[in-house]
Image: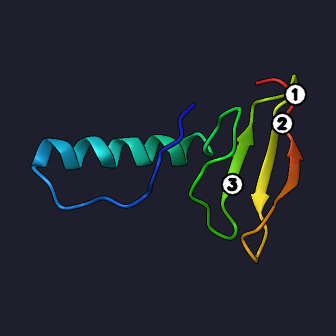
Amino acid sequence: MAQTSSYVIENDAGLAVRQRINEVLAALQSCNAGATAPVHTRPGMLWLDTGAAVPVLKIRNSTDDAWEEFLDGGTY
């Protein structure tokens, strides 16, 4: 489970760029899983909210001002 502080990958040395790419990919692979919502959001973004006993998959609404429950995740 991973989140990233930003999806922007700045120009940098090879190793630093590769590390940022891996961080962003890990966040995408885990649906931004975490107990708190990602700070930087976009409409349609997914977030697996693991803050409760049963994880809930949430989606960012089209105006990018709220999370909507999309699917009860159950245990995984």
**Mark 2 or mark 3, whichever is nearer to me:** 3
Q: CA distance from mark 1 to mark 3?
A: 16 Å
Secondary structure of the residue carrying tag 2 is: loop
Residue labelled with disc 3: 46
From the viewer's perspective, is 36 left or right of 28? right
From the viewer's perspective, is 38 left or right of 65? left
Quadrant into which the C terminus falls: top right
- Which amino acid lies under the numbered mark 3 shown in the image of this protein? Leu
From the viewer's perspective, is 29 left or right of 37? left
Check if mark 1's residue and mark 3's residue have beta carbons within 8 Å.
Answer: no
Residue ID at (76%, 77%):
63
Q: CA distance from mark 2 to mark 1?
A: 7 Å
Residue nearer the viewer, 36 or 49: 36
Check if mark 2's residue and mark 3's residue have beta carbons within 8 Å.
Answer: no
Residue labelled with disc 2: 73
x then y, percent, for residue 41 = 61, 61
Kindly indicate the quadrant of the structure image that contains residue 44: bottom right
Secondary structure of the residue carrying tag 1 is: loop
**Badge 1: few (under 14), some or many (20 or more) residues near its Cα, within 10 Å?**
few
Mark found first going from the N terminus, 2 or 1:
1
Check if mark 2's residue and mark 1's residue have beta carbons within 8 Å.
Answer: yes
From the viewer's perspective, is 26 left or right of 75? left
- Which amino acid lies under the numbered mark 1 shown in the image of this protein? Val
Residue ID at (87%, 29%):
74
Residue ID at (69%, 38%):
36
Residue lying furthest bottom: 63
User: How many marks overall?
Assistant: 3
x then y, percent, for residue 35 = 71, 32
Q: Which mark is residue 54?
A: 1
- Which amino acid lies under the numbered mark 2 shown in the image of this protein? Gly
